[in-house]
C-alpha cells in the first residue's frame, strides 16, 4: 500500500458525507500513524467536525472507508457501519458533555464501568486519570459545581481513563478564555505524548493547530486544501486560502518574467511594474502567478538597505499598535500591504520608507 | 469482514425494534379508532349490520338539518374564545409587563384554575347562576329584584364557564410570548426617539401579534371540542353543541351511530384544519421575532393603577377557584342547597352517603388504579416516542410526530366513539373493561406526554448522550445512566400531568366505561343528573381532595428521593 514503515492507526479513504442530496464533505483521505496527532484545521462549516464525528461513528457517511487499528469501521463497499459504542474510541467534546447528575468520579469511571472492570481497578484508574489532569482532590465533587476549566480537565480525564488507543478532540479548548487556553494547549500536548495515544484534533484556531500537531490538514468547503507538518503549512502554503487562513499573508500577483531568475528562483512583474523575486519550491508557475508573503517577513526601514534584491520605496499609511506586534499598512505600487513587526522604532504615518523581503519568503502558490 | 458487520447490525436492529415497535403500536392505537370513526360516518347501509353494507355521503348530507347545533357550537366557542383571550391577554400583560404588587404569588395562583376542572366549574356555576335556584339569583330576588339576574344555562353563561376553566391556556401561551420577547427590541426603538406609544404600536404589538393569533386559534379549536360545561349546563335545557349532541345520539335509544360519527368527523376535520394552521403560523412567524431565551421584560411603572390591576388578577382567581370551591362546599353541607339555609339544615350526610356508595368506592379505586397505570405506561411510551422523534435517525419519525399529536385535534368524546366502535369488533374481549379505558387514556394523552417530555428533551445537549456512546455504552445502558436520570424532572412532571388528566377524564370515559368498570368522573356526572346537586358537590369535592392528596404524596416522595441522591 504505502511506503510507511508501520500501518496507520487511523485510515480514512475517499470519505464522503452528505445530508440529503447536499454533499457536505468529501472526498477526504488521510492516515494517522500510531502516537501521532493529526489536526483538522479550517473555518466553521468546512466539514472538519463532521469528518471527526464520522470517525467516531456519530455521523453516517455516504461513501468511503474508515479503518481504525486495522479493523474496518465503515465501508460503503462492504456495507459495514460499526456503531460508535463498539469502535473503542474516546472523544472530548466541545461542550465537554460532563454529566451534571454524576460526581466527578462517576463521570470519569463511566468508560470503565461500561467495560465491566472491577471496583478496585476502577478506583485506581479513575484516581490516576484525575491526578493526570490535576483534579485529584475533586473526585467526590458534583460535576455541576465545576468551572469551565475544571470541566474541561474532567472531560479529558474521562476520555483517557479507560486507556483508549485513539482519542478524538472536537474543539476542546474553544470554550475557555484566552489565558487558560494557552496553558491547556501545552498541557494537552504533554499529556498526549505521555500517554502515547493517537489522536485527531479539530480546531479553527491556527496557533492551537500549529502548536499541538504532528500533522495538519487544512480543510475548506468539505475538501482538503493542504496536508503537511505545521512548519510546512505555515511556511509553504500551497493555495491562497491556506496562505490567508494560516496566519495572515500578503498575496502578490503578477506575470511571470521567464527572462529573470533561475536556480529555483523566479520573478513576477506586478501590474504596477515592480519586479518581485521569489522561490518556486518545486511548484510549476503558470504565466500568471501569485506569491504569498507572511506579514512578519516583510521589513520596513527608513533608509535603503544595501544588497537586497527585493527593495521598494513605500509610504506608511497607518500604524496600528497591537501589543506584542505593531501592524503597518504601507502603500506599495498603488496597493496596500500589511507588515507586522515587533520593533517600534521611528516609523510614523505618512512617512516614506523602504520595504524589503528575502526572496525565500516569497512563496509561489499553486 | 461479513462476520464483523453482523454484530453491529444486531445492535442497531435491537434498538430500532424496540423504538419501531412502540412507534407502530402508538400509531395503530391512534389510527385504528379513526378508521372506524370514518367507516361509521360513511355507513349508509343497515345500521345493525357490520361491517357496513353500503357507503355514501348521506350522513353528512343530513347535517344541515342540525344547523341549530352547528350555530350553537360556533357561537359558544366564539364567545368563549373572546372571553378567554381578554382574560389571558390582560393577566399575561399585567403579570409580565407591569409592576403589579405580589407578582410572583399571583403568577403561581394563576396556575390553580388548571386543577379545578371545567366540570367542577360547571357544577359550581350552575349552583350559583341557574335561573331559578342559583344562589346569585336567590340573593338578587332577596334584595328585591325580579326574575333572574344571570342565567348560566344560556349560551353566554356556558361560554363564560368554558372561558374561565378552559381558557387558562390562553394566559400561558400569551404569557410565554411576552416573556420571551427581547426587551432590547423595544429599547432600540426608544433610544432612537420612538415614544412610549409609538414603540407599543409599531414594535410591541406586531411582535406579540403572531403569538396572540396562535393562542386564539388554539383556544377556539379547544372550545369547539369542549364537552363538560355544555353537558352540565346546556343539556337540561335542551341546548346542544356538537359534542353533547354526539353524546346524546350515541347514548339515546335507539342510538344513531352513523349520524353521530358524521358529526364527529366534521368537528374533527375543522379542528384538524385549525391545528394545522396553528402549527404553520407558529413555525413561520413567532420564532423569528421572538428569540428562545428567557428575558425579564422591562416592566411599566403604572402608579396607583397597580392596585386596580392587582384586583383584576385576584378577581380572576376568585371567579375561577375560590368562589366555585366555596360554592360546592356550601351546597354540599346543606340538606337542600339554598342561598340562605337554616342552621338545622346543615349536614355532613352527603359526604357520608357519597363515601358509602358502592359505585363511588369502586369507581374511586378504579380511577386511581387507572391513573397510576396510565401515567406509568404513558410516561414510558411517550418518553420513547419523544426520543424517536427528537433524538433518533429512524426513518419516518416526522410522520410519527404527526400521528402521535393527532389525538390533540380530536375531541376525546369523538375519539372514544371511534374506539368504542373499533373495539366492539376486535377479537379481544376488552370492551367494557378497565383495559379499554387504559388504552383510551394512554392514547388520548399521547400529545400531552410527548409535548411535556419533548420540551425538556430538546434542551438536553446531544453530546451528553454521544459521549456515553463513544465511551462504549450501549443504547439501553445510556438510557438508564444518562438520558433518563437527566430527564427525571421532566418525566416526573409528565407522570403527574398524565395522572391528573386520567383521574379526572370525562369525555372518553363516559362512553367507554362499562357497568363493571365505573370510573369516578362519569359517575359524578351521572349523580348530577340522577340525584341531587348536594350529593354531587360532595363527590366532586372528594375527588378534588383525593387528587390533591395524591399530588402531595407524589411531591413528597419525589422530593425525598431526590434529596437522598444528594
Image: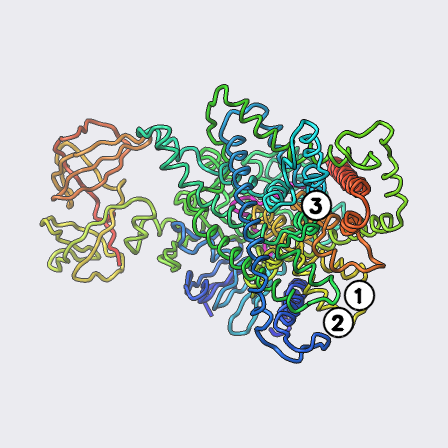
Which label number is shown at residue B119?
3
Q: Is residue B260 left or right of residue B326?
A: left
Per the image, the residue denoted by label 2 is B426
Q: Disc 3 sits on a residue from what chain?
A: B
Image quadrant where residue A256 sits: bottom left
Q: Is residue A76 left or right of residue B50?
A: left
Residue A93 lies in magenta, yes or no?
A: yes
Classified by dominant secondary structure, the portion drawn in magenta counts as: loop
Which label number is shown at residue B430? 1
Q: How many badges with numbers are in the image?
A: 3
Question: Which residue is situated farthest in the left direction here?
Answer: A273
Q: Is the Cβ of the residue at disc 1 closer than 8 Å to that at disc 2?
A: yes
Q: Which residues are magenta?
A: A89-102
Asked if residue A16 shows in the view, the reply is: yes
Q: Position of residue B80 (x, y in %)?
A: 57, 45
Q: Are marks 3 and 2 on the same chain?
A: yes
- Assess disc 3: are there few (<14), some (14-19) or many (≥20) residues with their C-alpha within 10 Å of its C-alpha: many
Query: Label 3 vs label 1: CA separation?
Result: 28 Å
Q: Earlier in the sequence, mark 3 or mark 1?
A: 3
**Secondary structure type for disc 3:** helix
Amino acid at each position: 500500500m504505502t511506503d510507511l514503515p508501520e500501518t496507520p492507526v487511523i485510515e480514512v479513504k475517499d470519505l464522503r458525507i452528505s445530508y440529503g442530496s447536499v454533499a457536505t464533505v468529501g472526498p477526504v483521505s488521510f492516515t494517522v500513524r500510531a502516537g501521532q496527532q493529526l489536526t483538522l484545521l479550517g473555518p466553521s462549516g468546512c466539514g472538519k467536525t463532521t469528518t471527526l464525528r464520522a470517525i467516531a461513528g456519530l455521523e453516517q457517511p455516504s461513501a468511503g472507508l474508515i479503518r481504525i487499528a486495522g479493523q474496518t469501521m465503515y465501508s460503503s463497499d462492504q456495507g459495514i457501519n460499526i456503531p460508535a459504542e463498539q469502535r473503542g474510541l474516546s472523544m472530548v467534546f466541545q461542550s465537554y458533555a460532563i454529566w451534571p447528575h454524576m460526581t466527578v468520579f462517576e463521570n470519569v469511571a463511566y468508560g470503565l464501568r461500561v467495560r465491566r472492570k472491577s471496583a478496585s481497578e476502577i478506583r485506581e484508574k479513575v484516581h490516576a486519570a484525575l491526578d493526570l489532569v490535576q483534579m485529584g482532590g475533586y473526585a467526590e465533587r458534583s460535576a455541576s459545581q465545576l468551572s469551565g476549566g475544571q470541566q474541561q480537565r474532567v472531560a479529558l480525564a474521562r476520555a483517557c481513563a479507560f486507556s483508549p488507543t485513539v482519542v478524538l478532540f472536537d474543539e476542546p479548548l474553544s470554550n475557555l478564555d484566552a489565558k487558560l487556553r494557552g496553558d491547556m494547549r501545552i498541557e494537552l500536548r504533554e499529556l498526549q505524548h505521555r500517554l502515547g495515544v493517537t489522536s485527531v484534533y479539530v480546531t479553527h484556531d491556527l496557533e492551537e493547530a500549529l502548536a499541538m500537531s504532528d500533522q495538519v490538514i487544512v480543510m475548506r468547503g468539505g475538501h482538503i486544501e493542504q496536508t503537511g507538518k505545521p512548519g510546512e503549512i505555515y511556511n509553504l502554503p500551497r493555495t491562497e486560502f491556506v496562505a490567508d487562513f494560516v496566519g495572515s499573508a500578503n498575496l502578490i500577483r503578477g506575470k511571470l518574467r521567464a527572462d529573470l531568475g533561475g536556480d529555483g528562483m523566479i520573478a513576477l512583474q506586478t501590474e504596477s511594474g515592480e519586479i518581485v523575486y521569489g522561490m518556486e519550491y518545486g511548484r510549476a508557475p503558470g504565466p500568471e502567478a501569485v506569491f504569498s508573503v507572511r506579514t512578519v517577513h516583510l521589513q520596513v526601514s527608513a533608509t535603503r538597505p544595501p544588497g537586497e534584491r527585493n527593495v521598494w520605496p513605500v509610504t506608511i499609511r497607518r500604524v496600528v499598535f497591537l501589543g506584542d506586534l505593531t501592524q503597518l499598512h504601507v502603500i506599495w505600487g498603488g496597493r496596500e500591504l500589511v507588515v507586522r513587526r515587533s520593533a517600534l522604532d521611528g516609523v510614523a504615518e505618512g512617512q516614506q520608507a523602504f520595504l524589503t523581503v528575502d526572496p525565500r519568503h516569497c512563496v509561489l502558490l499553486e | 469482514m461479513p462476520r464483523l458487520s453482523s454484530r453491529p447490525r444486531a445492535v442497531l436492529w435491537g434498538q430500532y425494534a424496540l423504538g419501531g415497535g412502540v412507534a407502530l403500536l402508538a400509531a395503530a392505537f391512534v389510527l385504528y379508532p379513526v378508521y372506524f370513526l370514518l367507516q361509521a360516518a360513511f355507513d349508509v347501509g343497515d345500521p345493525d349490520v357490520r361491517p357496513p353494507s353500503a357507503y355514501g355521503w348521506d350522513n353528512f348530507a343530513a347535517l344541515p338539518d342540525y344547523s341549530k347545533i352547528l350555530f350553537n357550537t360556533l357561537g359558544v366557542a366564539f364567545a368563549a374564545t373572546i372571553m378567554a383571550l381578554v382574560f389571558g391577554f390582560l393577566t399575561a400583560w399585567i403579570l409580565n409587563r407591569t409592576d403589579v404588587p405580589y407578582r410572583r404569588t399571583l403568577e403561581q395562583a394563576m396556575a390553580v384554575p388548571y386543577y379545578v376542572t371545567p366540570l367542577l366549574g360547571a357544577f359550581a356555576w350552575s349552583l350559583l347562576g341557574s335561573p331559578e335556584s342559583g344562589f346569585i339569583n336567590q340573593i338578587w330576588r332577596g334584595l328585591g329584584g325580579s326574575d333572574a339576574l344571570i342565567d348560566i344555562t344560556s349560551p353566554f353563561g356556558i361560554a363564560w364557564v368554558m372561558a374561565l376553566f378552559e381558557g387558562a391556556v390562553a394566559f400561558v401561551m400569551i404569557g410565554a410570548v411576552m416573556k420571551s420577547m427581547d426587551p432590547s427590541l423595544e429599547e432600540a426603538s426608544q433610544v432612537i426617539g420612538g415614544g412610549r406609544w409609538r414603540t407599543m404600536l409599531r414594535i410591541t404589538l406586531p411582535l406579540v401579534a403572531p403569538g396572540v393569533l396562535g393562542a386564539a386559534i388554539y383556544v377556539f379549536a379547544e372550545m369547539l371540542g369542549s364537552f363538560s360545561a355544555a353537558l352540565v349546563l346546556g343539556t337540561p335545557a335542551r341546548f346542544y353543541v356538537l359534542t353533547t349532541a354526539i353524546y346524546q345520539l350515541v347514548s339515546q335509544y335507539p342510538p344513531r351511530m352513523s349520524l353521530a360519527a358524521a358529526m364527529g368527523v366534521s368537528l374533527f376535520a375543522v379542528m384538524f384544519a385549525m391545528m394545522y394552521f396553528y402549527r404553520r403560523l407558529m413555525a413561520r412567524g413567532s420564532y423569528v421575532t421572538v428569540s428562545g431565551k428567557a428575558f425579564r421584560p422591562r416592566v411599566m411603572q403604572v402608579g396607583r393603577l397597580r392596585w386596580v390591576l392587582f384586583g383584576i388578577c385576584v378577581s380572576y382567581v376568585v371567579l375561577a377557584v375560590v368562589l366555585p370551591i366555596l360554592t360546592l362546599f356550601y351546597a354540599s353541607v346543606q340538606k337542600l342547597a339554598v342561598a340562605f339555609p337554616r342552621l338545622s339544615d346543615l349536614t355532613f350526610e352527603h359526604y357520608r352517603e357519597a363515601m358509602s356508595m358502592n359505585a363511588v368506592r369502586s369507581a374511586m379505586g378504579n380511577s386511581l388504579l387507572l391513573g397510576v397505570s396510565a401515567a406509568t405506561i404513558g410516561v414510558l411510551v411517550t418518553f420513547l416516542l419523544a426520543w424517536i422523534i427528537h433524538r433518533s435517525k429512524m426513518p419516518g419519525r416526522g410522520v410519527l410526530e404527526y400521528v402521535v399529536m393527532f389525538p390533540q385535534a380530536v375531541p376525546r368524546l369523538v375519539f372514544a366513539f371511534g374506539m368504542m366502535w373499533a373495539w366492539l369488533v376486535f377479537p379481544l374481549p376488552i370492551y367494557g373493561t378497565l383495559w379499554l379505558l387504559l388504552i383510551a387514556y394512554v392514547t388520548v394523552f399521547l400529545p400531552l406526554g410527548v409535548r411535556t417530555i419533548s420540551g425538556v428533551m430538546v434542551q438536553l445537549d446531544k453530546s451528553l448522550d454521544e459521549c456515553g456512546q463513544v465511551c462504549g455504552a450501549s443504547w439501553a445502558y445510556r438510557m438508564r445512566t444518562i438520558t433518563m436520570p437527566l430527564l427525571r424532572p421532566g418525566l416526573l412532571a409528565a407522570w403527574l400531568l398524565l395522572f391528573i388528566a386520567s383521574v379526572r377524564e370525562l369525555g372518553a370515559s363516559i362512553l367507554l366505561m362499562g357497568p363493571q368498570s365505573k370510573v369516578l368522573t362519569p359517575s359524578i356526572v351521572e349523580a348530577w343528573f340522577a340525584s341531587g346537586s348536594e350529593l354531587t358537590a360532595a363527590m366532586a369535592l372528594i375527588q378534588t381532595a383525593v387528587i390533591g392528596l395524591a399530588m402531595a404524596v407524589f411531591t413528597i416522595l419525589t422530593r425525598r428521593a431526590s434529596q437522598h441522591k444528594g
